[in-house]
Image (spheres, rainbow, N blue to C red):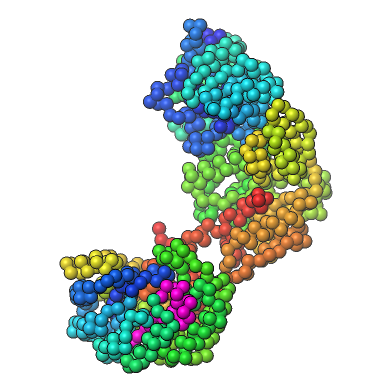
Amino acid sequence: MSMQNIRNFSIIAHIDHGKSTLADRLIQTCEGLTSREMQEQVLDSMDLERERGITIKAQSVTLNYKANDGETYQLNFIDTPGHVDFSYEVSRSLSACEGALLVVDASQGVEAQSVANCYTAIEQGLEVIPVLNKIDLPAADPDRVIHEIEDVIGLEASHACHVSAKTGEGIDELLEQLVREVPPPEGDPDAPLQALIIDSWFDPYVGVIVLVRVKQGSIKPRQKMLIMSNKRHFGVDEVGVFTPKRESQQVLNAGQVGYIIAGIKEIDSARVGDTITLASHPAEQPLEGFKQVQPRVFAGMFPVDADDYDDFRDSLEKLTLNDSSLSYEPENSTALGFGFRIGFLGMLHMEIIQERLEREYDLDLITTAPTVVYQVLDTKGELIEIHNPADLPEVNYIEEIREPIIRTNILVPQEYVGNVISLCIEKRGVQKNMQYLGRQVSLVYEMPLSEVVMDFFDRLKSVSRGYASFDYDFVRFQADKLVKVDILINGERVDALSIIAHQDVSQRRGREVADKMKELIPRQMFDVAIQAAIGRHIIARTNVKALRKNVTAKCYGGDATRKRKLLEKQKAGKKRMKQFGKVEIPQEAFLAVLKVDSK
Amino acid sequence: MNPETLLQTPPLSLYVHIPWCVRKCPYCDFNSHEAGKEINESAYIAALMSDLDQELAINQHREIKSIFFGGGTPSLFSAESINNIIEDVRNKALLSTDIEITLEANPGTFEQQKFSDYRSAGVNRLSIGIQSFNDDKLQRLGRIHDSKQAIMAIESAYAAGFENINLDLMFGLPAQSVAEAIEDVELACKLQPSHVSHYQLTIESNTYFHKHTPVLPATDFIWDMQQHCHDTLNKHDYLQYEVSAFAQAGKQCLHNINYWTFGDYIGIGAGAHGKLTDINKPSIQRRWKQRQPAAYIKHAARENPCSGTSELDQSDILFEFLLNALRLRHGFTYELFEQRTGINKQRLLEACENIDPDLLVISETGLNTSPRGFDFLNDVLESFLVSKK
């Protein structure tokens, strides 16, 4: 196929705005799958993705479309994740495309996440085609939304396609517009190979599958390929495209998006953003890659049963095969034993990983409250990164503590703007910009990431009745008056419960956490003293009174099995608790630090 | 099982279950059923006799030390029926000369004559379900009697010639004050029964109270009640020998002590449980009967009313021995442990190593809980529990 007939594109859409349904509809229209094979939302292939209705990993589909001009076009659709935690994957997907469909729900209007991704697409020089979806809904208001796209994003939208992915209305026109407006890829098929790795994942049958965009040259089976950063050689076994079934091809040419299988065992050998060339005719320069993503949120995870530690480590290793953004290091907690401190891209990423570990690998885990990365400048002038509040040096060795600051863009309907501003102030936000754009207001704030990690998203949704949306970017580390608040149980510091808080709110936070602990720790044989402390200074104390007795009054005569079953049930209930000294601390307590604010 | 020490044949008791009540109490999770218009006593008695035949066939030549008619409300049955059962046992089995025969009776289900006839039939111990002498509390517990009937029941028992009487009392009742709980115990002591069972009301699953739970006194109040009530019982020379059992000197309930010392028992009647040791096999077996009275009667008449048996393995035996024997205030001797379980005492002492030393008293001759361990018996037992896969 001539390069003139190739179109590479992505879809930018907010969660719920119908990206997956639209993708399904496109696949169906181009007969990528027979209707028998057509499974709802084929692109979200992980169970979790389908359940949560979000895309986590980029995927690609190659479709053949016979346009009205009589030509057949190859449409390469590269899927993008829709959640802020995974925004780095978006820019990766976009770099493989020449165009993007900006899908906006015709009843809901533009959301912040789409704005951010849309700007990324424009910056990368993509042709952005606005699409109004869900026009079959009674609440659809295409004219208003068209104005919103023009006001908020500054994108000419009068020609926007009106579609309903659900009913199929407008899909043919959309495909025609796509073929017409998205430019074909450029590149010289005869130049030395340059293929950008967009994604790679581990398949138990064939090893690592590498998804690439071929920029120059071509690649075929039996050639020797070279990964440019690490100079490793692999023999190409197979190349092809996803339709969305994996379909092998003779060759991948410049302009195409497709996969390569080359007997690669470790995902580290073919990292995302790297360039593949041919060993026989190597390219002179690698392509410009992507920034390595930095985990922003860290949490400790510990197996409830210490015997599961090895299984836990193996499971993490397997997960990392498919998720290079996941990083972990062993952690030893006096309260929780051996486990790992795991770095995540954000809270959703953390929840997904925890769920996968528990569901797919059948592990019982205790997760500690997530924390952001802090930088500590010590008295010797050294800068240390802190992933765990418990690792903070003694106060007298600390010159200053710096916390990550993010810049957030919030889009909110006018009537809720007051609530959102109050929330941002409460979260130590500093306003940078505020703009009225039609019905919506765009707010730009700088605020500490730690405040966002806590519960910002939930609170934002609740103060705006679900209408506000936001997006953020890391900007810098910044020193502030931060202190470590420790929780002591019966006089002993529980490392897994320490938090870092701003001095102005540290007293209140300490009290709240102590109170929450009191609520969560059940009465037991001994008094349990709970204290919150900053350094040696106790800022809050409370206690859980001892039970007076725990004995069954009546023994059921001859039936010993009943009594035994009761005791077994009681004991099983305690399995979800962690023994700290003589005190049993329930699992929820370790996440309680997170929950105190959300009243 | 594979005994490490010489397993001995323990004493044998007989439990007879009468599964009917006038009305089901809202806190009760025992196998009891509302009697309705009329109970077919003779059909049930025939079933009990057939059940007994089959049980005795596998327990030949063993002496029976005690019989206990429990329920339900056994005093719903006529003295003639009770007499027939006792006669039947006497004809088929060897009874010890000082046999204890207890019958549970609920106030409001009998008159003076019936008690006299029970006595003549051979019943020598009555256990009366008083629960409280406070009318308001009795009503909240859904009992069919009031305090006047309760006192009358006790007086009738004395008049009928019973000397060995137990009163069942409950505390921690809905809307009960500490003073009211003590009052109940004071009144009971004044009536001079030989034995008092003093239970805390517990909300069990599968009861009316579990679904519609009444407001109960705060746990710390209940603890105060218990302390004061125990002091009162002590003051009147009722000594605690088990978690909920108090007796005058020498008047402990032999039948219950047999349970708590891991003795053997035959259980006949709907849903009755039995435990039998066979030193020849050797094995310790639990057996239980059809729960529904109608099914029980049907099965007993045709073939076998047994609905299940299970052989205990060593870890079951160790745990179930402790489950029972540690309920006794003074615990047990290693000698008794080895005889009843066939397990070397060393294994017991190893199991004790996981237990908080504050909770157990491990002496030269035996094992018992400390006063604190006695109050936290569930925690002690839980630590002995080995989870089974």
Where A273 falls versus B138 (above or below)? above
Q: How many marks?
A: 0
> Where residue A99 sits: x, y (%)?
60, 18
The residue at 69%/56% (across/down) is: A512
The residue at 53%/54% (across/down) is: A304
* Residue toward you, A305 or B379: B379
Where A190 falls versus B234 (above or below)? above
The residue range painted magenta reads B122-143
Q: Is residue A351 visible?
A: yes
Queried whether the magenta region covers residue B131, the answer comes back as: yes
> Where residue A561 sits: x, y (%)?
37, 67
The residue at 48%/65% (across/down) is: B213
Tell me which corner region of the image, top left, top right, bottom left or bottom right, holds residue A586.
bottom right
Residue at the extreme left of the image, as rendered: B302
The residue at 18%/67% (across/down) is: B303
Where A317 falls versus A515 (above or below)? above
* Residue toward you, B211 or B342: B211
Residue at the extreme top of the image, as rendered: A69
Tell me which corner region of the image, top left, top right, bottom left or bottom right, holds residue A198.
top right
Where A452 falls versus A10 (above or below)? below
Queried whether the magenta region covers residue B216, the answer comes back as: no
> Where residue A554 sits: x, y (%)?
43, 74
* Residue toward you, A442 or A369: A442
* Residue toward you, A407 or B155: B155
> Where residue A34 sits: x, y (%)?
40, 22
Q: Is residue A268 visible?
A: no
Tell me which corner region of the image, top left, top right, bottom left or bottom right, holds residue A470.
top right
